[in-house]
Image (tube, grey):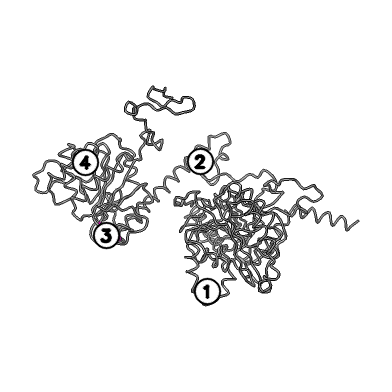
Amino acid sequence: MTPKTPEEPQHVNGTLSVRNPQHSPAPDERAKYISTELGIRERLFVGILTSKNSINTLGVAVNRTISHHLDNVVFFTGTRSRKIPHGMVVVTHGDERLIWNMFQTIKYILEHYITEYDWFYLAQDDTYTQADRIKALVEHLSMDRVLYMGSPEEFIGGEMQGRYCYGGFGYLLSRSLLLKLQPFLENCRNDILSARHDEWLGRCIIDYADTNCVEEFEKYYYYEMGKNSDPSKEDNVLFTNALTVHPVSDPEQMYRLHKHFTEIELQKTYEEIKKLQAEIKNVSVVAFEGNRSALWPVGINPPFEPKTRFEVLRWDYFTEDQVYSCIDGSPKCELRGIDKLDVADVIETAMGELNKKYKPVLHLKKQQLINGYRRFDPTRGMEYTLDLQLEVVNQKGHSRSITKRVHLVRPLSRIEIIPMPYVTEAARVHIILPVTLQDREHVQQFLEVHATNAFETSENAILTFLFIYDPIEAQQVNQNDIFASVKAQISAYEHRYPTVKIPWISVKSESPSQIKFMDIISKKHPVDTLFFFATVKTSINSEFLNRCRMNSINNWQVFFPIHFQYYSPDIAYHNQPLPNTMDLVKETGHFDRSSFTEACFYNSDYMATRTRMSSDVQENEEILENLDIYDMFVKYSGLHVFRAVEPALHQKYSYQPCNPRLSEDIYQRCVQSTLDSLGSRSQLAMLLFEQEQGNST
């Protein structure tokens, strides 16, 4: 802590006294980020020199082959076309002169990135860059070294002493070099004449930083590509080890190069894995438990160990044609679809590994799968045990039939990190609450909870009621409005909370359809409106509304939360007093995965998706009733449909009749949700046991 100086403000008798500012020192400005204050920088910045004629072809190809390997890739161009490629950072200098563009590029880097990075790599868009090798190279370089590294070239005419880095193969510039060059950059622009931008930069560095292009400090491998060359047929050592390849004639060749070098790196990775596995096996021999201390497979997590009998993982039995664990509860069903492909792939893999192990002494052929078992282990992946009947043929041609048991694991390995757009918790949520005749009795409790969680806390949310009348109820609305009591309750809450307005909309429908209702609501709100489609039995709080804001991303993602459904009190608390509050535990309820009624999404996403399905609606209007909002987004949107359990969203139990007019899928979901919400299996079993005992006596 810094001691207070006489020039700082003084508090006297509750008033603020400020000294003469002319004698006050400037306050210390703290950095926004710790990394900035401590001077921590990223290692590598990548700049790609492109043009308006090639940015949509070669530029896009460069971006697709290196951007997911490197943290920051910026494309520099003189001018650009109207259409800018999606997902690329493009800086336009406004002039097509090559020397001017190089000057502006270096100047832009000095102004915007010099404090954030240690190394700066510049290349042309007709250069293929092996991104991982460039990253590995700079990891071995000292950050304070004045270094200009690339492919050294003699100056045209030989009049100039020293060598510059040829731009076609890219080059590395250290932060120290650019800082040394910064005061003289204007002089280079005015004094140095050149026909090539890389030669101009080389002369500037030699004249004012006294540094030549080098390649030997840490070997900078590069390779000159022949015209119409096929990367898969190149066997040159320089090509195999190259950091960069030039020139690349078209995007297709860029992708072929990327495929080739990716396969090389993948093969190296496999070889390293084999070496590590062998080393683990060798070390485990001298361990206390011997070979048993080495997990199988090597490098995969150990099997899940259940804490109770309820956590024991189930093994499913299968053959090549049948599976004995079916979704509908049947004891046996046909093996088909993805399950059949899975079993075929596992058997093929098993045979391949067996032949690899016993060749050339023995050759094995599959006769049949006798028994198959599989289970999903959340810590490892899918485990398999196969009993195979095999025909074994030796080198002399003699054969016999044997039975062999094999174990396989399909590990959980292909995890993808999806970059997410930036969102805030400042968006206003418009809560849409459909109410039918059967829902009236739950409105009062909903409003009480919502008033406590939203009205009294000034939550940034607007509640809108959607009153659903059937045709007969709509005709009698003037004489007997079935929602008169609900509208009176709304007026009472508006009177109690003067700053709160609760709008409502009336619709007439024979068969309630989420899409039809949203068509009406969507037209009444701006395109940037964030909707939460709720139910009258749902308890909404600020914690959930914040997650609704964070998980709903405009033009990117919609959110369908899985609420916690409480069991029927008569079953969950049979012969027990009801508690004042119910905890979120497995004895009180479950996360209802069969319910898709609640949803968070932006109006613009709904409108775009609704437009895409318009052609199908013209051919078959019943599709509006056969699909709900979830199905619509999954089938037509192309957005990320995020489905996750939501512990802050609770729903109390009440019997919910399912409308048979809806589609078969929606109706079956409703039925399954109603059955699952009665109680847990153990609670239902205990109730049946008591009834059986009562009947027997």
Q: Position of residue 16 (x, y in %)?
A: 44, 29
Mark pair 3, 1: CA separation = 42 Å
Tag in front: 4 or 1: 1
Identify the residue under disc 4: 214
- Stretch of the chain drawn in magenta: 51-57
What's the residue type where badge 4 is placed? Val
Do the numbered discs 3 and 1 sit on residues whose CB atoms are within 8 Å?
no
Residue 281's tag is 2
Q: Judging from the image, what secondary structure is the residue with disc 1 in?
A: helix
Q: Front-most of 432 and 649?
A: 432
Identify the residue under disc 3: 54
Tag in front: 3 or 4: 3
Going from the N terminus, do you reach mark 4 or mark 2 first?
4
Q: Position of residue 171 (x, y in %)?
A: 25, 45
**Does 615 sit above or below residue 98?**
below
Residue 163's tag is none
Q: Front-most of 309 and 394?
A: 309
Tag in front: 3 or 2: 3
Residue 617's tag is 1
